[in-house]
Image (cartoon, grey):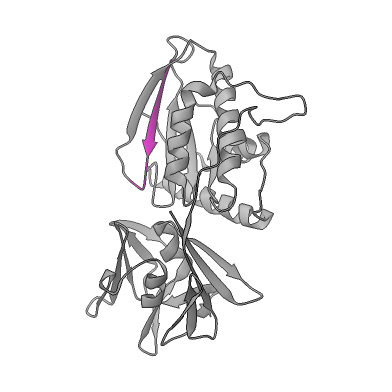
Amino acid sequence: MPMIWKQKVALALALVIIIMSVPTASFGATQEEIHDRIMFMHQQIEEMEVNSVYSNVYVNSSWIDLNLVSTTGSVTTYTYSNGNPTPTKNSFTISPKSFDFALEKIVRYVLGNVANTYRQEPLNTEMTMITHKRTTVPIYVYGPFKEQALHEINLGLPDCFNIEYDTSRGRSDPVKPISMPVVEKTLEAIFSLNSTTYTINNETKTMDAQPVIQDERTYVPVRYLAYALGATEDDVRWDEVSKTVTLSIGGITEQLTLGSKTLLVNGESIEMEATPFAEDGRTYLPARWVAEPLGAQVDWNLETGETKVIITE
C-alpha cells in the first residue's frame, strides 16, 4: 500500500518539477484561474500529507504501484475518493518494462494528455503527479470532474505504454488524444452585490437580503445559496440551539456553524478560510466553500460585483 511522503519541501519541489516538465494548454481559462486552481490543489495535498490521508472532499488520488513493472509487468492502482480511507484496487499486467520507461509513458499520458483535456472549459479540473524518489507514484486530481478524470486515467493506463508520441517539436501530447467528455450545463445562478434579486438560468428571483463582501470573501444568504445549488426548502435545516445550518444536496450533507471555520462534509471536517455569520436575522455562508464540495464552480467578477455559481452534470 502507498505511504505518504513526509517531507513538505521535497513535495513542493516535486510538484513544481512535474508541472514544468509537461506543456499544458489553457483552452479558454486564464492563467490566473489556472494558477489559483493549482495553488489550492497544492494546499490541499499538503494538508492531506499532514493528516496522513490520501483524499478529501476537494482532491482525489490514484497511487500507481510500479514496483513489479520491470520483473513481472504487474501494475496496481489504489484510488482514493472523497475522503474514503479504503481505496479501490485494480491490477493489470503488461509485458515487463523498465521503471523509467513506464514512468515516462504514464507522465506523458496523464499530464500531457488527460490533464490538457480536463483543464478545458467547462471542466476546470487540474491534476499533478509526484515522482521524486518513489516507485509508487501518486496522481492528485482537483475539480468538479475529479472522479471522472481518475476513472478515465485508470481505464487508459494499460494502453498508455503503447502510445506513440510526437516529439518532433518537443510536444508531449499523444498522437491520438482522448475525446472531450460531454458536459451539459444544468444550472447557473448569478448573485450581485447590493441587490435583492438573483437569477437561476436567466430567471429572475427575489431575496429578502443582499450578498455581502467580508474579508474579501463573498457571502450569500444561506437559503438562496442553497436554492442556487439545487436544494429545495426541505433540504435546508437550521438548529437554533447550536446555531448550525445543514444542507443536504445530491447525497452530500454539509454542516456549518455560526462563528466557526469548520465545515463538515459528510462528517469530514474541513477548515475554511471564512466564517459564517448572522446579520439582521439572516445567516450568511461563504459561497465558494459551500459550493465547491457539491461540484459547483464559483466565479467572482470584480468589475460587475457578480458571483456566478455553476452546477454541471
Residue in the foreground of this view, choosing between 196 and 275: 196
Residue in the foreground of this view, choosing between 88 and 85: 88
**Magenta residue check for 79:** yes
Extreme residue in the left direction: 241
31 lies above or below 308? above
**Residue 196, image x and y in percent?**
48, 86
Which residue is found at the position 44% from the left and 47% from the top?
A: 59
Residue in the foreground of this view, choosing between 282 and 147: 147
**Residue 235, image x and y in percent?**
28, 69
Extreme residue in the bottom direction: 280
How many numbered callouts?
A: 0
Quadrant housing the N terminus: top left
- The secondary structure that most of the magenta stretch takes on is strand
Residue 136 appearing in the image: no
Which residue is found at the position 41% from the left and 87% from the top?
A: 208
225 lies above or below 118? below
Q: In which quarter of the image is residue 252?
A: bottom left
**Magenta residue check for 291:** no
First to last magenta residue range: 74-83
Residue in the foreground of this view, choosing between 60 and 270: 60
Residue 50 appearing in the image: yes
- Left or right placement of residue 275 versus residue 243 in this view: right
Q: In which quarter of the image is residue 3?
A: top left
- Left or right placement of residue 72 versus residue 248 in this view: right
Which residue is found at the position 39% from the left and 41% from the top?
A: 54
**Residue 120, image x and y in percent?**
60, 48
